[in-house]
Amino acid sequence: MSDVISFSEALRERSRTAHSTSEHSGFMTDLMNGTGTRDDYIALVVQHWFIYVALEEATERMRVDPVASVFLSDKLTRMPALESDLDFLLGEGWRDTVAPLPTTERYVARIRRVAATWPGGFVAHHYTRYLGDLSGGQFIGRLMQRRFGFDTNGIGFYLFGDIADPEAFKNVYREQLDAAPWSDDEKERVIAEVLVAYRFNTELFHDLARAKAARTA
């Protein structure tokens, strides 16, 4: 008899390839290996801001949902840190100078659409972003800190000061995924939506690479 695989394990395994494809895109590889510039990093932070506006607006609406609300924690909130980072990186007037890339617009629209009609879809995007922030995002933040000489200004997005043990936090989150009262069909829909979220992230990195090429041409 084969061992039963939990939903959170199935989700992680079935999204592993998509996750790897996203984080090894050319834009992110350049940023991580030192080829990318400070401007490239800033461009990424700007797009994050648009994404998290949508995600955290949706979070507020989901506080009344009996299933999705279980996953919510104020310790995950990223908007104040993102806005502080952009104040530091671009100056206080940055809101008048930034714009979403095409993939970001589609990504934001998707988050808002699923959050309006489908709690499981919201959880899929919540899981993809925040558990990623608590995993590889921690390494990215430290690397950008060293590379560009930041203290905490500029990388606040990656600092979760209220979460003393990120691994323990993620384990609780995965236990909550396993306890969610979803049917097998709904679990398949949630996994499919996680793959959609990873695809948006990969396509965003491609957009950022194209924008950089246009900027430096």
Image (cartoon, rainbow, N blue to C red):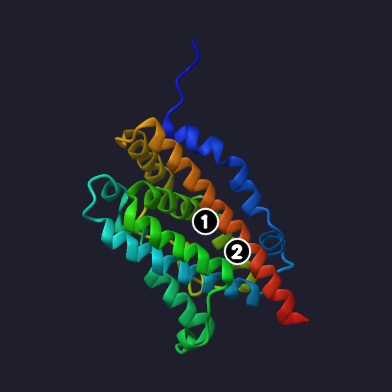
Tag 1, which secondary structure?
helix
Q: Position of residue 138 (x, y in %)?
A: 52, 56
At x 43%, y 28%, the residue is: 6
Q: Name the front one of labels 1 and 2.
A: 2
At x 51%, y 53%, the residue is: 197
Left/right of residue 119 with respect to residue 8 in the rendered view: left
Residue highlighted by disc 1? 138
Residues packed near mark 2 inside 10 Å, few (<14), some (14 to 19) or many (20 plus): many
Q: Position of residue 113 (x, y in %)?
A: 39, 60
Left/right of residue 102 with respect to residue 1 in the rendered view: right
Vertical position of residue 157 compared to residue 190: above or below: below
Vertical position of residue 105 compared to residue 161: above or below: below
Residue type at tag 2: Leu
At x 49%, y 32%, the residue is: 10
Which quarter of the figure has residue 114? bottom left
Residue 4 badge: none
Outermost top residue: 1
Which quarter of the figure has residue 14? top right
Name the one closer to the observer, 14 or 137.
14
Residue type at tag 1: Gln
Name the one closer to the observer, 47 or 45.
47
Return the disc, 1 or 2, that comes first in the chain's sequence.
Answer: 1
Residue highlighted by disc 2? 204
